[in-house]
Amino acid sequence: MTASLFPSAALGFALVLSLSGCVLQAPQPEKTGYQKAEQSTSSTPSASSSPSPQSTLGTQPSASPHNSAGRVTPSQSVSPRLHGKTTEGPKTELAPPVADPGARQQTADGLYLFAEHWAATFNYAVETGDFKPLEDTLSPRVSPRWSEIIASRKDVYTIKGWIEGNTMSISRLNSPLADVGKGAQGMVISLELTDGLMRGTDPRTGREYTYDIEGDPAMEVVFIAEYIEGNWKFITTTEGSKPGQ
């Protein structure tokens, strides 16, 4: 498995990302066992009768005929959104995010402040290659899909590449804190993932490569976490406009 992380040519990255389970590709629905969030009116009903929610990061809204967001494709030039903002490696000068003290409160305000910190640690990891602060925010029950999403970004740095852009922003909606089952709680937020670039040098050939990473438009998701010994820990996000039924 480790050897397969080193492509023999730049175009090998698209294949490697897929084979390694990298969810820079569009993810598939995930069964988590949590209560199903109410789907928005624009969502296409699932063909399955399972009450399990869907993971939404890396997907377009279900009304779209194609789920292309998150796909990695070869780039012949710098993405227009990133033109003039490219770097030559990880942003190691950045300091790790520090959570607001209020993020430890077991309230709606506390969960949202924690969600902001979680998003900040995700961005810090993507920009620097230091995933420790992000991993510290995760529950032991973090969903398999989110484990893969994080591992896919980490793999880029394992092969001495780096990511530009592909960062997350969230905003608060008028949502209460609600129990969603299995001891977890959730609230609805808006989440957006920007376009990005994956760049680096093939360690075997010395050839430079650049790949576009498609982001996600802002969408409503249920942010789900659990409260453990005075701290929130992230579990997953699911598509929907209500925390639970």
Image: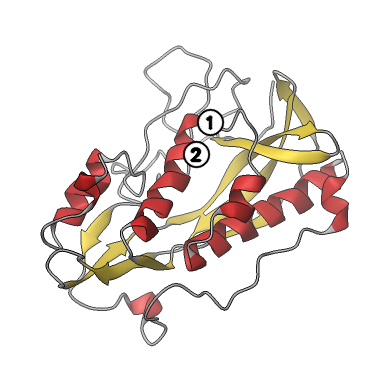
Report helix, strand or loop for mark 1: loop
Residue 106, placed above or below residue 203: above
| Nearer to us in this view, 61 or 70 | 70
In percent of width and height, residue 119 lies at 62, 55
Residue neighbourhood size for the residue with mark 1, other residues' Cα within 10 Å, grouped as few (<14), some (14–19), many (≥20): some
Image quarter of residue 123 = bottom right
Residue sitting at 48 percent across and 21 percent down? 31
Q: Tell me if residue 153 comes above or below residue 231 in the rendering.
A: below
Marking on residue 143: 1
Vertical arrangement, residue 158 with respect to residue 145, above or below: below
Residue 194 is situated, as x and y percent measured from the top left of the image, at 46, 63
Residue at far top of view = 49
> In the rendering, which numbered label is found on residue 176?
none
Q: Secondary structure at mark 2?
A: helix
**Which residue bears the numbered disc 2?**
146
Asked if residue 191 shows in the view, the reply is: yes
When asked about the image quadrant of residue 166, the answer is: bottom left
The N terminus, quarter of image: top left
Q: Quadrant of residue 111?
A: top right
Q: Residues within 10 Å of mark 2 (few under 14, many from 20)?
A: many
In the visual, does 32 lie left or right of 155? right
State the quadrant of the C terminus. Answer: top right
Residue 106 image offset from top left, x and y in percent: 87, 38
Residue at (44, 72) in percent of width and height: 90
Q: Are marks 1 and 2 in contact (CB under 8 Å)?
A: yes
Along the horizontal axis of the image, is 12 left or right of 60? left
Q: List x then y, in percent, for residue 199.
A: 30, 69
The kind of residue tagged 2 is: Trp
Q: Residue at x 33, y 44 (%)?
A: 22
Q: CA distance from mark 1 to mark 2?
A: 5 Å
Left or right of 89? Residue 132 is right
